[in-house]
Image (spheres, grey):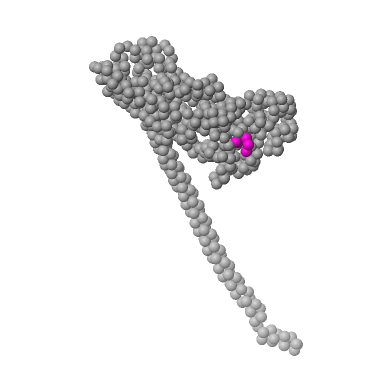
Amino acid sequence: MPLGGLIGAMSMVAGGPGPALMGAVSGAAMQAEMAADLKAIRRELAEIKQLQKQMIEIQLETMKMIRELAVVVEAYHKIEMRKLQEIKSMIVMDIEAQRLLTHSEINSCEKMIQYGVSMNADRSQPYRLGSVRTVEATRQLLKTSLQEKGALVRFARSSGESNYETCQRSMTKAFGSKNANENPVQFVANFRNDELATFHKDIYQPLVEALQSKKIISYPVMLTGLHLPAVNADSLRRKVEYAIRGEGAVHGVEQYDLINLISTEGLERYVENLLVLHPILSYDKADWLAAEKDVNTLKERYNISWARSNYWLENALSLVQSAIAQESLMAGEPLMPGLADQFGSLSEVTECREDNLPSQRLACAVRRNGILNKNLLGFVIRQRIPVEGLRTHYQKALSGLKTQALEQALGLDFAGKIKVKEPKEKEEGKEKYLVFSWLDKDGLYETRLPSPDEVIRGEIVYTSNMKRLLVLQDKLIEAYLEVTPMAVDESVQKQVRRMILQK
């Protein structure tokens, strides 16, 4: 063996399997370590997955709880809403019960009338309770029924166990005072209206304040009589002239109840029963029963009967006149000249709030009252354009939708406020028209410009209640004059009829 080979072999022997064996051992350790690491990672991943699973389960449980809670809340909400509805229903029922209780006594009067009319064999003449328009028919039917000897006594005794006294009491409740406070004819006693308080505060009360403002009312308005409404601008002008000259009858503001809104329907119902029954109810039931044995009983009680009828009728007339005054005020009749003088400021941009100054509240009340602003607009146009101009220039500009021409003719306070209005879709075939815009930051109020004929006639528009109230006033005056013939001077009545709605 060559020396080199021996040395190489010896070195290999001497070296043995060391380097190779060492390499192998190192690889196995690493693999074991890696396996351990992988195992640890897998274990950690399993733990993470377990945690994730637990988290998901917790989330699912939470979602389930939230859903169940939502169901519970919804159920609770429904229960609460049902309870609130029940409470509201109870309140409504209570209001209705109070209203029924309030008017239960007047029902006794109507039962008496129905019973009395039923005593009449001839009932061909129609009548309807609750309307003063048929009061004459009702009175005549009852009068005919009670003409037979002893019929009045039978009527008083047999019209119901306690109807007579109850009806008599209802007349005293309604007409025992000239004030409508706590009175069954008061508006709130006849209607359930959540907006009534808002109407009173935002629309009606500012007009009452304006009536007492020297800035708006420059003439002695109470001399005109608020219960004597003018039919048009000309009769209003005459009323103002009479007041300025001191020729009108003296009426104090205390004559009217302008605070408690009066229901025309309620007033009409009570007045009708009063007009039909007061000659009978003015005597107590005991008087009629005693008269069966001694007719002189009624003669002895006449003064008491007269005083009671007079008292009821006088107070009823005062309440009707207060109701007329309220309707006149809501139409703006007594305020019209002063409002026309303030038209510029009233038609400026407003921002209606509870804390506004009186002048701002008045401006808001004017634009939100459709009847009043219609009357006011016609009144102002009538003041600013003469009759000849109305039939020519105004008519031409109105039909031609010439807003600028109208604004120039009417004045600066009309500038930019006359707009062309498109007819609504359902109003097919109708042409465009012009409106006056009452600007407001919370909305836009519009009043259609009147025709030339409307302006020339100058009619003051009232609600349908006014005509009914005037009929009531006429009927009560007639009944009052029957009881107290010298109560009203005929010359005064003639003067009144010339200048007011009564013809």
- What residue lies at 60% left-to-right and 28% top-to-bottom? 237
- What number of labels is visible? 0
Task: Name the outermost residue toward the left.
Answer: 293
Part of the protein shown in magenta? 338-342
Q: Please provide percent x and percent y for residue 110.
A: 38, 22
Q: Residue at x 72, y 85 (%)?
A: 8
Which is nearer the eye, 146 or 483?
483
Which quarter shows the C terminus? top right
- Residue 368 among those drawn in magenta: no
Between 62 and 441, which is closer to the camera in this rendering? 441
Is residue 20 or residue 109 the one in the foreground? 109
Q: Is residue 67 above or below residue 379?
A: below
| Residue 425 appears in view | no
Q: Give left or right: position of 242 versus 474.
A: right
Q: Quadrant of the N terminus?
A: bottom right
- Residue 279 on image: x %, y %: 36, 20
Residue at 70% in and 36% down: 411
Q: Name the main secondary structure of what is drawn in magenta.
A: helix
Instruction: State the image coordinates of residue 157 (x, y, percent, origin top left).
Output: 28, 20
On screen, residue 169 versus residue 325, left or right, reads: left
User: Which of the 4 image quadrants contains residue 214?
Assistant: top right
Q: Position of residue 291 (x, y in %)?
A: 27, 18
Whether residue 465 is visible: yes
